[in-house]
Amino acid sequence: MSTIQATRGTRDILPEEIGYWQWVEATAREILAKAAYREIRTPIFEETALFERGIGEATDVVGKEMYTFLDKGERSLTLRPEGTAGAVRAFIEHKLYAAGGIQRLWYIGPMFRYERPQAGRQRQFHQIGVELLGTADARADAEVIALATDLLQTLGLKNLNLDINSVGEREDRLKYRQALIDYLTPYKQDLDPDSQERLTRNPLRILDSKDKRTQEITKNAPSILDYLGENSRQHFQRVQQLLRNLGIAYRINPRLVRGLDYYTHTAFEIQSDDLGAQATVCGGGRYDGLVAELGGPETPAVGWAIGLERLILLLQKLNAPPKYNLDFYVVSKGSEAEAQALVLAQQLRRAGFSVELDLSGSAFSKQFKRGDRSGAAACLVLGDEEAANKTVQLKWLNTGKQSAIAQTDLLEKIEEIRRQINAAKS
Ligand code: ATP
Ligand code: MG
């Protein structure tokens, strides 16, 4: 009988890899909480119209990549391809703006896009993202960019490049759009088929084309930066000034336009030199038009999303393993010793330690090997002799030092042991 496998473009995240995910999630939670961002969890599927309006029908995401289906009640639903539209819908639906002032939100979860699967590109993938709603101030742009770079740096990533650009306000973009069409039209036959089609529908996206010939042509295309109005120019200058103040290096990339229609002013991407073709780890920008577009009050906003698969590929490549968090690995052999080990493990867990109990019943040597691989700070060993004396061998895995200790002492000297464990892990 043929077996069923995970469907194309999806994959299982197995326990051996999960440490990376939990490490990234814990680090993100900590960094975002320190900056007063609060988590929001929205549904995985939404009305299709939300994404059509919120992302724009001329984009690849809506035009080609959405998982859209009719449910049994004939409603057109779509698995969310990104997190911003849902967060903004919730922001409007629950009148989060009524509290006045600013909302700082973040989310994490699976997203769905019908794409050609390859390394760093899946059909179900995960994003962590932030949305800072309620202010047009350039400090907000700088704040969210700083959070993204902080998160990536805290995880130990290097060789990252921050590209920034301004796509201006709607009027600036309309003028630029026309200039771009005027420039590209004579080359129309030489553009790749997708770009030919975009020429009238969404010409800014042509700058994003991965086709070599098209890239040659767009090299000399007019720059959006020459079409920014005074307001847009000032905003962009201020963002750059603030990034310099924060010590964040950036490059200006006038071809960085992002795929989504609601972006205004700042657009940015963080890329890694270590990722190959799928180099962009983080994409974001300002989207002052979106809340009103979805029926809410005029609300300027800025945010980003980080692709977790790409981030974790990088962490694995850089050989930056997550810090282990197991305190004790408990090894025992013999019926009485095994019974005592079970009790001891429970007592230690109640005292706040993480404890893995070897249940194999195999030879000590085999259990020790697993203990070595477990990432624990120390092994606890119980054999017949320890069971008879109510003692336990405490073996530190970093130094190999071993000593016998009464089981009651182990529990009484808990603070001392906690200090030793922390020292062994640091
Ligand atoms: P790309 O040009 O690589 O398709 P995008 O512009 O479509 O990226 P965004 O919509 O800005 O991407 O999403 C933000 C981040 O989410 C990306 O920078 C990337 O890290 C990640 N991401 C997007 N699509 C996928 C996917 N299909 N598989 C894995 N990660 C993805
Ligand atoms: Mg894409």
Image (tube, helix red, strand yellow):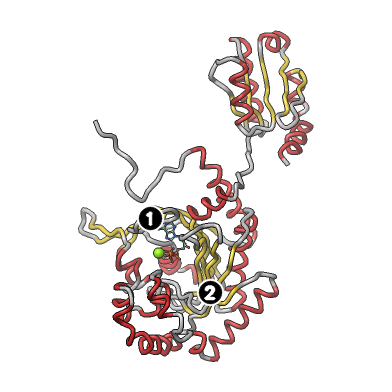
Q: Is residue 107 visible?
A: no
**Between 279 and 35, which is closer to the camera in this rendering?**
279
Q: Is 168 placed left or right of 390 in the picture? A: left
Q: Which residue is mark 2?
A: 134
Q: Is residue 381 shown above or below 108? A: above
Mark closer to the observer (1, 2)? 1
Q: Quadrant of ligand 2?
A: bottom left
Category of crowding for the residue at label 1, using alpha-carbon neighbours closer than 10 angstroms: few (below 14), some (14–19), many (at least 20): some
Residue at (63, 20) in percent of width and height: 331
- Determine the image quadrant of residue 340: top right
- Which image quadrant for residue 373? top right
Location of mark 1 (residue):
44
> Which image quarter is the N terminus in?
top left
- Is 338 drawn above or below residue 74 in the view shown? above
Q: Amino acid at mark 2?
A: Gly
Locate residue 171, reporting x and y percent. 43, 88
Ranked by sequence position, the earlier of labels 1 and 2 is 1
Q: Is residue 414 visible?
A: yes
Q: Residue at x 45, y 67 (%)?
A: 91
